[in-house]
Amino acid sequence: MAQQAHKVGILFELGEAQRNRTNWTDYKQYGFGEDDVEDLLELVTDLSLHGAPTESKEVWVPLHAWRALAQLGDPRAIEPLIGLFDTLCEDDWALEELPIVLGMLGKKAIGPLSAFLGDSSHSQFARSMAVSGLEEIAKRDASTRNRVVTIITDYLDDPDTNASGLNGSAVNSLLSLEARESINTLRRLYESGNVDLFACGDIEDVEMELGLRSARTTAPPSLGQLYGLTKPGSAKQKKIGRNDPCPCGSGKKYKKCCLQ
C-alpha cells in the first residue's frame, strides 16, 4: 500500500505537461502496472482535481493519470474514460487527448464508443470525442478501419438533425480515413443541409479531398455570409483548412480546436 501511495504521489509532483500526441512521459518507469488501474481511474475522475487552480500541480494530475492508463492499455479504463466525455468536452486537453487515449486502448473500445455516438442524450461535442476516438483506433490498428468507417457512415446515414457540428466532425473523420466508399452517404448528408460547412467545407471540397474530383465546378461558398458572420461585400476572409494550424495559436489543428 505504501508503494502504491508513493507512485500516485509522483503524479502530484510532475506538474505541467507538454502538449504533444506521442512524446509522453514513460509512466511505467515509476512502477505503474495493472494493479494501479483503479487508483489511476480515481484520479482521472476526481472533479476536484480538474477544478484545481490552473497554476497548481494538482490540476495536471488527471492528465498524467489518463496518459498512464493509455500506456498500460488495460480495457478496464475504457468505460470510465468515455463516461467523462460529457463532463470534459469543453476542456481543451481532454478534447484532444481522451480520444488518443481510447485509440491506444484499442479495438475493445469500439463498441462503447459506437454506443456513445448513437446516444443523442449526450452533447454533440461529447459525441464528437467518440468519433475522434473511433478514428484514432482505426489509424492505430488498420484491421479496424473498415469497421470504424462503417460505424461512422451508418451514423451519417441517419444523423442527428440537431447536431450539425457533430456531423461535420464525423465527415472529418471519414476524410482522415480516406473513406471513398462513404461518398454516397456524404452526398446525401450535404443535400440535406445537415452539416456544418465550417467543419469541412462543402461537398465539392469533400470530393476533392477524397480524390474524386480534381477541381471545383462552382465558386466556394462564402461561409461568413452563409452563417451571418459577415456582411455581403465585406473583405473576403482566407479559408482555414481543417488540417491547418488553428489561428487561435493553440498549436492544434483547426478541426481539433476552435472548429469544435
Image: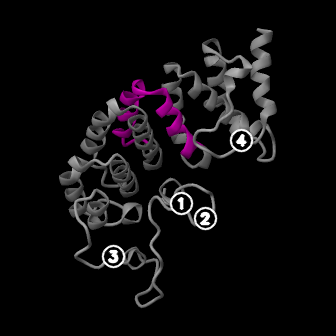
- Which is more foreground, mark 1 or mark 4? 4
Report the residue marked by disc 4: 17
Q: Report the Cα–Cα distance between label 4 and label 3.
A: 40 Å
Asked if 222 appears above or below 159 in the picture, the reply is: below
Q: Which residue is mark 1?
A: 258
Classified by dominant secondary structure, the portion drawn in magenta counts as helix
Give the mark nearest the N terminus, 2 or 1: 2
Question: In this image, 91 relative to 115: left or right?
Answer: right
Dot 4 alpha-carbon crowd within 10 angstroms: few under 14, some 14 to 19, many 20 or more: few
Depth check, front residue: 214 or 121: 214
Q: CA distance from mark 4 to mark 2?
A: 20 Å
Q: Which element type, helix, strand or loop, lies under badge 3? A: loop
Distance from label 3 to label 1 (Cα)?
20 Å
For the view shown, which residue lies furthest in the bottom direction?
A: 233
Is label 4 in a helix, a strand or a loop?
loop
Mark closer to the chain start, 1 or 4: 4
Determine whether 193 is above or below 101 in the image.
below
Q: As shown in the figure, which amino acid type bears the numbered disc 1?
A: Cys
Q: Determine crowd level at label 1: few under 14, some 14-19, many 20+ residues with C-alpha closer than 10 A.
A: some
Residue wearing tag 3: 221
Cβ atoms under marks 2 and 1 closer than 8 Å: yes
Label 2, secondary structure: give it.
Answer: loop
Which of the two labelled residues, at mark 4 and mark 2, occupies the earlier sequence position? Answer: 4
Q: Give, as a single range, the part of the protein colored magenta.
A: 94-122
Sequence-first disc among 4 and 3: 4
